[in-house]
Amino acid sequence: MAFASGGKGAMADINVTPLVDVMLVLLIIFMVTAPIASYPVDISLPQRSVNPPQVKSDPPPPIRLRIDTSGMVYWNDSPAAMSELQSRMLAEVQKDPTNQPTLEIDASGDAAYGTLAKVLTAAKNAHMEKIGFVDK
């Protein structure tokens, strides 16, 4: 839209071409730097084997580990001290390392994350391979 007084005045149009150019350059910069800002997560995927492992017909019963809102840990519905969790898990793994029980963790929504982190650290240190979370 042009505003002119008497036909030969100044034009009041905004030239948006430089603004569009800057916007497109910024868009390209963000598109290039976005993959750099992602964080890789290392996971170990199962590999294909020619000879599948023999599965035993009767897996051991799962271990139900419950964490309540106060931070108390229950091993199969009986209270357990945090200091003895790793030794209990290690004993379960050593019974049969090839046929471990599943550790089913049921953490309350209000439970402290630190307690759950300690339980997962104990399970990792005991070399437990089957860990699952119970969703209610």
Image (tube, rainbow, N blue to C red):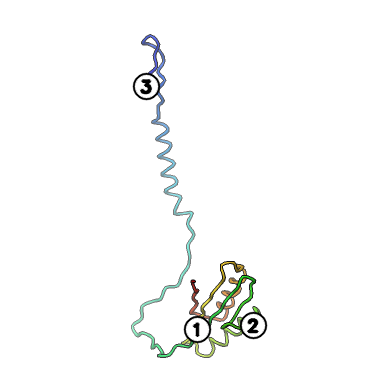
The residue lying at 54 percent from left, 74 percent from top is 106
Q: Amino acid at mark 3?
A: Met
The residue lying at 40 percent from left, 11 percent from top is 5
Q: Amino acid at mark 1?
A: Pro
Residue 1: assigned label: 3
Of pointers 2 and 1, the one earlier in the residue sequence: 1
Q: Amino acid at mark 2?
A: Glu
Residue 84: assigned label: 2
- Label 1 belongs to which residue? 62
Of pointers 3 and 2, the one earlier in the residue sequence: 3
Mark pair 2, 1: CA separation: 18 Å
| Residue 39, above or below 122 | above
Q: Position of residue 92 (x, y in %)?
A: 55, 87
Q: Residue furthest top?
A: 6
Mark pair 3, 2: CA separation: 79 Å
Q: Position of residue 4 (x, y in %)?
A: 39, 14
Q: Which quadrant of the view contains residue 53?
A: bottom left
The residue lying at 56 percent from left, 79 percent from top is 65
Q: Position of residue 50 (x, y in %)?
A: 33, 83
Is label 2 or label 1 in front? 1
